[in-house]
Image (cartoon, helix red, strand yellow):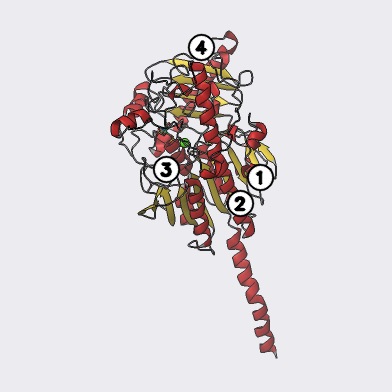
Amino acid sequence: IRKNTTWFLSLLILPLFIQCSQTKEEQKPNILFIMADDHTSQAISAYGTIFGDLFTTPNIDKLADQGMLFTNVFATNAICGPSRAAILTGKYAHVNGYCKNEKGGKFNASQWTFISEFKKQGYQTALFGKWHLGSEPEDFDYYKFHVGNGQQGNYIDPVYNDNGKHIKETGYATNLTSDFFLDWMKGLRKKDKPFAALLHFKAPHRPWIRDEKYKDLFDGVEMPYPSNFNDDYKGREKTAGDTWMTMDFLNHRDSKVTPPEGLEGKALSDWTYYGNKPNQAWMPEGCTTLEEARKWKYQQYIKDYLSCIKSVDDNVGRVLDYLEENGLAENTIVVYTGDQGFYLGEHGWFDKRFMYDTSSKMPFIVRYPKEVNKKSRNKDIITNVDFAPTLLDLANIEIPADVQGHSFAQNLKGNTPNDWKQCMYYQYYEYPKWHHVQPHYGIRNQRYKLIHFYYNIDVWEFYDLEKDPQEMNNAINMPEYQNIITEMKAEIVVQQKDLGINGSLEAMRAITDADMGEV
Ligand code: SGN
Ligand code: CA
């Protein structure tokens, strides 16, 4: 009888044991890192937009509703490849080796990344959509990323690198990239392991091509303009006033103008990109002044850009539904972000690059029901090198000492540490292509920003963001700020030393001049 009882008891206990070990395994959080290329917070309704009911992002807003929305998250170098490299490595561009898109060469994908660490810890890792770092990704169990167009990818019938094989797919990139992610979730993924997946949309990157579904969206509507659309760049003539990113630089292709009949080859290509260079501002039909042309181009641009985001938002909805329907919503950390901010007509521009807030600020939303309060908001100063250590920290994985970013896991839980950093360091190297933005570095704290433009000009700018959130008044010479400016100049030296940046202008210029190779 005794023997039988023991046997019977062990039968009862065994499943409990299995149950326990499974629960522990399941408790490792999954990571779903969603990033849309050039998606800026002025185009997410949860952040507040100037478009009112004309444009909303209900699915991204749902994440903000169920999690934490951040208002002071910054890219440390506001362009694509460098932002992606900083996110993956938790290190600044000069350390991870990827400082520029143009002549930036190839990202060394065999270096440590948060993905390589998750893989090492037994996670299933995967990448979908935009990679844009020149090299082949490493440490992903599965990847399917955009090739063609220097890895920028295409909107319609794009070619993907599917685990080493180039495949031309049929359809619209945003939908396809989501399909591939969902296929992997349902199929190839090993379901007994946690996952860390990157879902990186090409949209809403230039040339802002819409899905058929949204071809008529905003027809007959005049979209509102940002209040500084007609910036005259006073006091910033050599910096903000000397770019190739005003509405004048939107070319025929951007503006979706049909080419005249009979154009072929080089003539067709010249016509298509006409507008890209200085003194090529062209007049759309019906416009007689530059001012009218700028408004006309803005209307086309903003409607296309926002239409691209409607598709992103729809697909975020599909993905969130899948997580919910499969019991994965509770235990998955969902991040939604863009690789940098973007100008939607502010200062009269499109594109990004500047340390000014509109382009350096990233939208950033995290949903993780287990640890993060619903509808929570955070305004701590955080940068893209902080993402990698934070995700590892949330999964209880040790952060290597050479990672430069800091975990904000406590901030996410609503307990910002008292000694949390008060300012961030920024540096942009690429010049003159694209868009002719002077290389610059600087620091920003909760109230002030100091920038030095250094390549072939020597210009300092200072902004009081409380009084001048749009950064229209360069206050570098105003007597009342001289003490703060002196302090911040000293702080720049401290930051550069801490980060291992050689602050000599020669060394910095050399990075801009270096040809690391085209992708
Ligand atoms: C392309 C775009 C630029 C854009 C860069 C970088 N020109 O070169 O307008 O700034 O990408 O974008 S295009 O005519 O080819 O569209 S990034 O997102 O990769 O940094
Ligand atoms: Ca980008």
Assess whether mark 1 and mark 2 are in contact (beta carbons under 8 angstroms): yes
Residue carrying label 3: 154
Q: CA distance from mark 2 to mark 1?
A: 9 Å
- Circle 4: residue type: Gly
Q: CA distance from mark 4 to mark 3?
A: 39 Å
Q: Earlier in the sequence, mark 2 or mark 1?
A: 1
Closest to the observer, 459 or 45: 45
SS for tag 2?
A: helix
Q: Earlier in the sequence, mark 1 or mark 3?
A: 1
Q: Earlier in the sequence, mark 3 or mark 2?
A: 3
Closest to the observer, 6 or 485: 485
Q: CA distance from mark 1 to mark 3?
A: 28 Å
- Expressed as whole percent of the image width and height from the top left, the position of residue 307 reads 55, 38
Residue carrying label 2: 320
Residue carrying label 1: 62
Label 1 vs label 4, nearer the camera:
1
Q: CA distance from mark 3 to mark 2?
A: 25 Å
The label on residue 235 is 4
Quadrant in the rendering for residue 156:
top left
Q: Earlier in the sequence, mark 1 or mark 4?
A: 1
Assess whether mark 3 and mark 4 are in contact (beta carbons under 8 angstroms): no
Q: Left or right: where does residue 442 sit relative to residue 506? A: right
Circle 2 packing at 10 Å, graded few (<14), some (14-19), many (20+), is some
Figure check: 267 above or below 484: below
Label 3 vs label 2, nearer the camera:
3
In which quadrant will I find the C terminus?
top left
The number of callouts visible is 4
Assess whether mark 4 and mark 1 are in contact (beta carbons under 8 angstroms): no
- Circle 2: residue type: Leu
Q: Is residue 9 visible?
A: yes
